[in-house]
Structures are given as C-alpha cells and as structure tokens.
Image: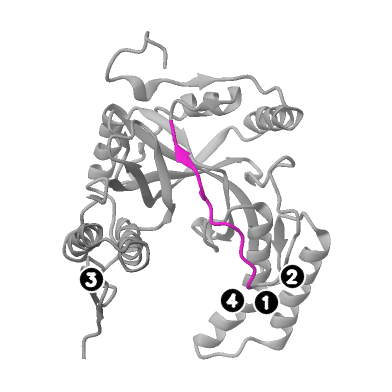
Amino acid sequence: MSSEVPPGREHLYMNVEHAEHPVAAAQEADASDAAQRYGHYIIRGPLFGIASQQVGGGHRWEVSTPVACGFPQDARDRLNSTLWFRAKDDTDERAVRRELLAAVARLETAAVDEVTAAGTRYRVVRCEEIVYTNGDGPEPPRPTDPEPAVRDWELGSREPEVDTGFVIDHIAAASVMEASERLALMGLHYRSPRYPAEVRADSRRALRTHAGTVLLPTAYRVLERTAAGWEPASAVLPSPHAARRALVHILTWLWPATHEMRGAELPEARRAGYERAAAEFRAAGNANAVRLDDGRELLVVRMRRLVRIGPDGPEGPRPSDEEENGEGPTRIHPALDEDGTITHEG
C-alpha cells in the first residue's frame, strides 16, 4: 500500500489497473456501454452474509456464507450451523471444540453480529442490493458475463454458490470501470421519505463510519413485474444461466404448486401456457424475459451488491435493519460436548 495513504484512511484506497487480457478488455468495453445505457439504479435493500478473518490477518475478509440472506438473523443462524458442524466434524482438539461451542452458545441466545473462535473472527456483513435500470426496465445479463461450460436445465442441478471463494479486499486490483462504479456509489444512501427516519439516519451515518466500498461478485435474479414494481421471484444466483433455469422452474413447478397450495387447481389452459412459455424460453438459449398470456412477466436481471468498508472492515447490520417477524436466536442443533458427543433431547 502506498505510504501516502493517511493512517486510518486505508479503507478509502483503490488500486486501479488497466485491463490487458482480451477477455478483460471486452468486459471493460461492455461495462462502459452498460454505464451509458443504464444510467439509473434502484436500491432493492440490504442482504446479509458471513465473512471471516484470521485474528491479526490484516484487512482481508473471506466470504464464508453468501451475502444473500434477507435478514441479519438468517445469517447468524447460518453462522451458528457453520460453527456447530466445524466443532462436530473438523477438529479432534477439545480446546478448539470448546471455543467453537462457546461461540455457538452465544449465537443461540443473543443477536450478536461478530464472534471469535479458534483464531478466526466471524462477522455478519451487510450489502446493498442494486439493480441498474433505464426507461426500458432493469439491466439484463451482459454478453460478456461468464456462463457455465455446460448449460444444464435440470431443476436439481447445482452451481457453486454465489460469492464462493471471494475475498473482501478493498485494495485488491480493480479495473477502471469497477473502480469508477465504486467511486460513483460511495455516496449511496437512502434519501426518499418513504423510508423511515431511522433508516435514513443510519444510511447517512454509514457514509462516515464506512466510507469505503467493495463490490461483491455480480449476481442474478428472476424478477416479476407487479403493481408495486419489479419484485424478486428467485434467490440470488451466481450466473445468468442459473437464473434462466430458475425461471423455467418457476413456470413449470413453482407457480402451479403455489396455486394448488392455495386450494385451487391451476386451470389446464394456464398450465399449458406456462409449459409452452418455458419450452420456448429454453429453446431461445439466451433469452431474458417471458411475457405470459395472463399478463404476468418475468425477467432475468443482473444485480450488484455493495459492501461498505470502515477502518475495521466490512459493515455489519444497522440498528434499523429489519428482522423477520417472530424470529430470533434459538438452538438449531442438538447439544454437543467438548468430546464430540451429541445428546438428543427426549
């Protein structure tokens, strides 16, 4: 790091490199074109995940649970499970297991956003989900966005989770367009009066406490057009094809099953329409939109997720971030002792 960066301001440092590889250069050109065509953005709200860092490990944090949970407690519960299984399966040392189980016990009883166990800090991290848009709607995948080598349409197929192996490192080399995007988003905060006052206040405060920015790997979703705007119809997914596969799954299974769960069988003509639309969508290969005879519309979109960075690393949940109704810390797994013995209640 340059010695010219003032102490305590390292989180504002950016290392910009020009793209030299032809693929990277093509992605840069694609990003420049998209920045001109999609000049507005929608803040969809926060997502949460877990990042870890070796104690004394500097500024780098590795994402250990995808930053894709809708509520902070969802991420805490995933951390609870991660540590419990680590204690169960990944160590034979009683002292290490004791530390891990102590962290699990804290997560079972308190809404803590950071724990340290066995030499590793674990933190719930927060990002803002952003979709770029223009007058025609949200941005779809770009031609240069990576696709899997084999495009499998089977509903049970799995790709690596979004964020797998990603390290939150604000001084890692960034392309010119990524650095420009990070700079442009430094001032992002909630302004509209439709947000509660405490949400807006926390958002303004974060501009001071976590002034740096890092972009997580590009992700994708299926959105559905509703009277209120574009709403998520799928989880956060790692590739355009994963989102397209999810869209087919929505048409051929999820919507019919949801209709039946409500106590009414889906009319055969509508079911056939969904199946026909799914087949045509698959045949098109790289299609990103489906418009149905009943007026419903689905769209595969490209989304960005922004993590704010402060002197001590990535931002955690804010006081005004919502928790799911009725959900809180609880025991998730059976009792495990420092010898690795599991006790099932009852």
Q: Secondary structure at mark 2?
A: helix
Q: Earlier in the sequence, mark 4 or mark 2?
A: 4
Task: Please tell me the numbered disc located at residue 339.
Answer: 3
Q: Earlier in the sequence, mark 2 or mark 1?
A: 1
Q: Tell me how far mark 2 sits from mark 1, CA to CA.
A: 7 Å
Task: Please tell me the numbered disc located at residue 278.
Answer: 2
Q: Earlier in the sequence, mark 3 or mark 2?
A: 2
Tally of numbered discs: 4
- The kind of secondary structure the magenta stretch mainly shows is loop
Q: Residue at x 70, y 71 (%)?
A: 154
The answer to the question of whether label 4 and label 3 lie on touching residues, with beta carbons closer than 8 A, is: no
Q: Which residues are magenta?
A: 156-169
User: Which quadrant: the C terminus?
Assistant: bottom left
Label 3 vs label 1, nearer the camera:
3
Q: Is residue 274 above or below residue 145?
A: below
Q: Residue at x 66, y 31 (%)?
A: 31
Task: Please tell me the numbered disc located at residue 310.
Answer: none
Label 3 vs label 2, nearer the camera:
3
- Residue 165 painted magenta: yes
**Coordinates of residue 123 in the picture (x, y in percent):** 30, 47
**Which one is nearer the viewer's eye here, 9 or 130?**
9
Q: Is residue 187 above or below residue 124?
A: above
Task: Please tell me the numbered disc located at residue 254.
Answer: 4
The kind of residue tagged 1 is Thr
**Residue found farthest to the top:** 4
**Which one is nearer the viewer's eye here, 172 or 261?**
172
Task: Please tell me the numbered disc located at residue 252.
Answer: 1
Q: Is residue 50 left or right of residue 176?
A: left
